[in-house]
Amino acid sequence: MPIATPEVYNEMLDRAKAGKFAYPAINVTSSQTLHAALRGFAEAESDGIIQISTGGAEFLGGQYNKDMVTGAVALAEFAHIVAAKYDITVALHTDHCPKDKLDGYVRPLFDISAERVARGENPLFQSHMWDGSAETLADNLAIGQELLAKAAAAKIILEVEITPTGGEEDGVSHEINDELYTTVDDAIRTAEALGLGEKGRYLLAASFGNVHGVYKPGNVVLRPELLKDLQAGVAAKFGKADPFDFVFHGGSGSTAEEIATALENGVVKMNLDTDTQYAFTRPVVDHMFRNYDGVLKVDGEVGKKSTYDPRTWGKLAEAGMAVRVTEACAALRSTGTKLK
């Protein structure tokens, strides 16, 4: 069962929360980066989450049409086939989708999975993200209610981002300022609108100073202890202990201590994109520099086919990214926790 069923995905998340670990959620943009993610999980003996952003899906759809739905569906179908060769379980997820891209991305994907479920099949994706962080909280939650109903009907988990993550990802950007911290009132309003599981399961991307992009440790002021306050505030009002399954966005450059605190406070999923992009590209750059005369037909020469063959440098890229995925599993304590 390499691609998780809805029941297994719920079990994965429950096990992570109970065990105080989280799954790396690896953004992919090609069949090659998909294999790198699967390989990294397998080598770490960890289950995991593979996700596709709107920009990644557009890239996967090909530069002739740039169709996001085509790209996402094609990679998901491919993943269902090739993941069978890896001895781990993964869930497929779509990353950040803002309001102006819902009709061209997430809503059609919900419909595809609903049709599959109506035929007695499993959904194509196991979860989708609605990123309403650029909207008012009221509008964000109103759309979230509509999407959560669609998700529940298709046996899919919804991820919601209720307040901004700083920096920029796929054209969605927010300033880095004091607004990057979710309040207890924000969390209570979320629970009032979306429920605490009775309307459908959702993952919550709360903000605790997170910033997308490349930052050295210490340059971003993270407050993962804030997640404990959100859990406690909502628990006090609704009588449900540790009500939220949190997602850690913008984790590049986070310290081990910050990650550990986040795990203790309910984080079950942590997104990785920037670091894995670099890990994929760095070996390619090294290969090109070392084999300059071979990859280029310098001064009218013929070059060396074996050096510019995409398989040569592609294997190096896959290996480099896979190593970074295994490192993420170790940092998030998911190493060795795969479903038996």
Image (tube, rainbow, N blue to C red):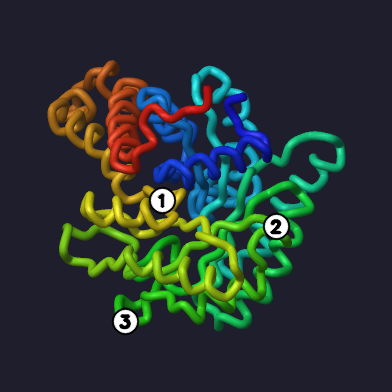
Q: Label 2: how many residues lie within 10 Å, few (<14), some (14-19) or many (20+)?
A: some
Inspect this view and state whether residue 157 appears: yes
N-terminal of the pair, mark 2 or mark 3, is 3
- Tell me the CA gap for discs 2 and 1: 22 Å
Q: Are marks 2 and 1 in contact (CB under 8 Å)?
A: no
Quadrant where the N terminus is found in the figure: top right
- Report the residue at 52% width, 54% height from top: 95
Q: Which residue is mark 1?
A: 271
Point out the tag, 3 or 1, that comes first from the N-terminus. Answer: 3
Is 314 situated left or right of 5 in this image? Answer: left
Residue type at mark 1: give it.
Answer: Asn
Residue behind mark 2:
200
Instruction: Please tell me which residue is depicted at 79% across the width and 53% down the height of the picture.
Output: 153
Number of numbered discs present? 3
Residue on which disc 3 sits:
178
The image shows residue 127 at horizontal and vertical percentages of 61, 49
- Counting from the top left corner in percent of width and height, residue 21 is at 40, 43
Quadrant for residue 140, please give it.
bottom right
What's the distance in space between the residues labelled 2 and 3, CA to CA? 31 Å
Q: In the structure shown, which secondary structural element does the residue marked by tag 1 occupy?
A: strand
Vertical relation: 10 (above or below) 243: above
